[in-house]
Image (tube, rainbow, N blue to C red):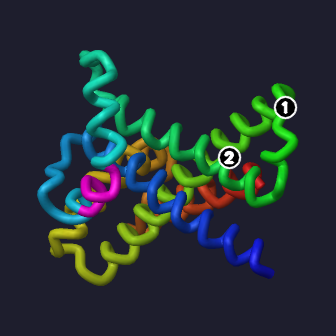
Amino acid sequence: MLIRILSFLVDSLFFVLIGAALMRAWMNRLRINMSAQPGTFVMAVTDWLVKPLRRVLPKAQSRVDWASVLAAFLLALVYALVWAALSGALLNLTAAMLPALLLMGLKMLLRVALQLAFMVVLVYAIISWLQPGSPMYGLLGRLAEPLLAPLRRIIPAIGGLDLSALVLLLLLQIGLMVLG
């Protein structure tokens, strides 16, 4: 029972940390102002890791925030190590287990990315029905639009209703199921 509780707490903590690092990278990619929420939260949660990585990494000419992406990846690897320690596998760590830990970290990173996208699109869809003029609607629209735009080109509006968010939510859920 204690292991299940610790596992839940570790999953929750690393979901927030990895999700914040990915959200920071996504917001920087879209050039969203970080001085308002959720930017201030994301910065507060990730500065301790991203700032030192920025000093070490060479200045990239791309729009990708590689320090935040690397921070998310490193956090996912630490998650895999903590999980292995909780399960007792870390006591018998061999070189053969390293690819499994790497795969587990990558799986966690992908799972958090899919869940984060799911939450952004879901809240965006709900706010579009309830408060389409709110400031949060504009922010969520900027975050969700790059994900929804390809689907909007394929899926026509039916009766004036845009179903692209629903289709994306279904695809993200399928992706999470495949990830298992």
156 on left or right of 105: left
Q: Quick one: which residue is furthest to the front in this view? A: 91
Q: Left or right: 117 with respect to 110?
A: left
First along the sequence among labels 1 and 2: 2
Image spot of residue 81 (x, y percent): 68, 46
Label 2 is placed on what type of residue? Answer: Leu
Q: Is residue 42 magenta?
A: yes
- The stretch in magenta equals 41-46
Residue in view at x 39 percent, y 76 percent: 126
| Residue 101 spot, x, y in % from top left | 73, 39
**Is the N terminus in the top left, top right, bottom left or bottom right quadrant?**
bottom right
From this view, report whether residue 76 is shown above or below residue 60. Answer: below
Q: Which residue is mark 2?
A: 81
State whether residue 178 is above or below residue 140.
above
Q: What kind of residue is marked 1?
A: Thr
Q: Residue 15: x percent and y percent? A: 53, 60
Task: Where is residue 59? Give x, y as percent.
Answer: 25, 18
Give the secondary structure at mark 1: loop
Residue at the image point whose x is 43% and y is 39% from the top? 71
Q: Nearer the viewer, residue 59 or 26?
A: 59
Label 2 Cα neighbours within 10 Å, binned few <14 / some 14-19 / many ≥20: some
